Image (cartoon, rainbow, N blue to C red):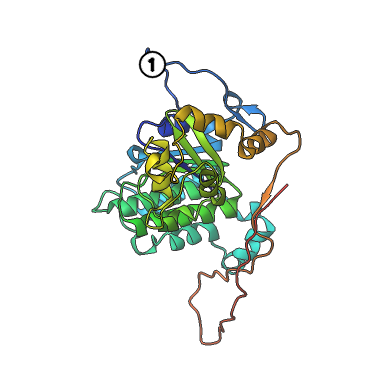
Amino acid sequence: MTLLLGPPGSGKSTLLEILAGKAKVTPSSSLEGSVMYNDKSITDICLSRFIAYVNSQLNKHIPFLSVRETLEFARDCTQGLRPKNFTPQMRKFFAHALVEGQDPFLEYVLAILGLKEVEHKLNGEAFSDFDRQKLTTAELALGTYSVMIYDQPFSSSDLAATYDLVDTLRTMSRIQHSSAIVSLTQLSQEILDLFDRVILLSDGHVLFQGTRQDAIPYFTKLGYIKPLHVESNEFLEDIAAGDGSKYMAPGATSPTLEELIECYNASDHYKDILRIVHGDEVKHTYWVDSEPGLGLTLKTPTKYDCAVDAQPRKETGQQL
């Protein structure tokens, strides 16, 4: 889960379009370089199967289909996860639902996104923007995309709703072992904490790329001090927008954009990116050491069913 930050005009949408293979060259622009996924050029892979790209303008659905029919159609048109393709971990998650002979992943997506209440409602009926956003997220969740790219898909300024959607994306990326890169305009510290990594852009240049926990300490070493009342994303975007002088320690001089770029290119964070990109070994990230079953079932509980307290979920990050 990577959060793409930067002030307006920093190049966030352009970067995401390039990564998704959707960048358009105009008479006043040029496009150079290459995009590689695991040493394969973006021109050599089937983008429609490999990458899911969503922005606020793409949040539309077939009006005469119900929510459930929309998701079933989306599943059947993509490399939807079928029980025969479940990993052992997923079989543990959906053990009870598999016994019922239904599509456990579809039921799971409907449940965690809160779409069960409107599953038989037509998309053309009165439908809130938030429900449309959830339906779009559910459509992508049912595919087996390796990379999910979201360019400001959430038009709602409701931070609680945005948190729920980002938390769902996090769950999906963990279950499907996929990558997600998201650009958001409205977020809080709680939403920021759901991400694993942060990329900070300014005028088309990367000022920081690394783990979320390292972002604030990195700029603290450069002389910036984040006030307690300022959100981390606001602090970072102010620096990228050239308004970071108000955060400078007494007596320190605010670096220019060129100096910030040079500092990042000389940092260990940048060297680590180069190591990953140019290394010969295959890298894997394992997020969960062990996970108790979710106990997901589609049947109505009977008086003979008993609840068992699950052990707290244990989640760790380990990169090889």
Q: Residue furthest right?
A: 281
Residue 54, compared with residue 11, is above or below; it is below
Tell me which residue sits at (37%, 12%) in the image. Answer: 27
Using the rendered view, name the quadrant where residue 271 is placed: top right
Foreground pick, 161 / 138: 161
- Residue at 53 percent of width and 57 percent of height: 105
Residue 42 point in image, percent of width and height: 57, 27
Q: Would residue 142 be seen by someone viewing this image from the given angle?
A: no
Name the one closer to the observer, 14 or 56.
14
Which residue, given by chain and number where applicable, does mark 1 sit on? 26
Residue 208 pos. (x, y %) = 53, 38
Name the image quarter holding residue 118. Answer: bottom left
174 relative position to 193: left or right = right
Q: Residue 55 or 304: which is nearer the viewer?
A: 55
Q: Is residue 284 left or right of residue 169?
A: right
- Residue that protrudes farthest toward the top in the picture: 27
Residue 317 in sight here: yes
Residue lying at the far bottom in this picture: please name it.
303
Looking at the image, residue 242 lies above or below residue 94: above
Would you identify the image quadrant in which residue 179 lies?
top right
* Mark 1, other Cα within 10 Å: few <14 / some 14–19 / many ≥20: few
Q: Amino acid at mark 1?
A: Thr
Q: Tally the numbered discs.
A: 1
- Measuring from the top left, give residue 161's x and y in whole percent: 36, 57
- The one of 272 and 99 positioned closer to us in this rendering: 272
Which type of secondary structure does the marked residue at label 1 adopt? loop
Describe residue 225's horizontal placement relative to residue 37 as left or right. left
Residue placed farthest to the front in the image? 251
Residue 156 at what x, y percent from top left? 30, 50
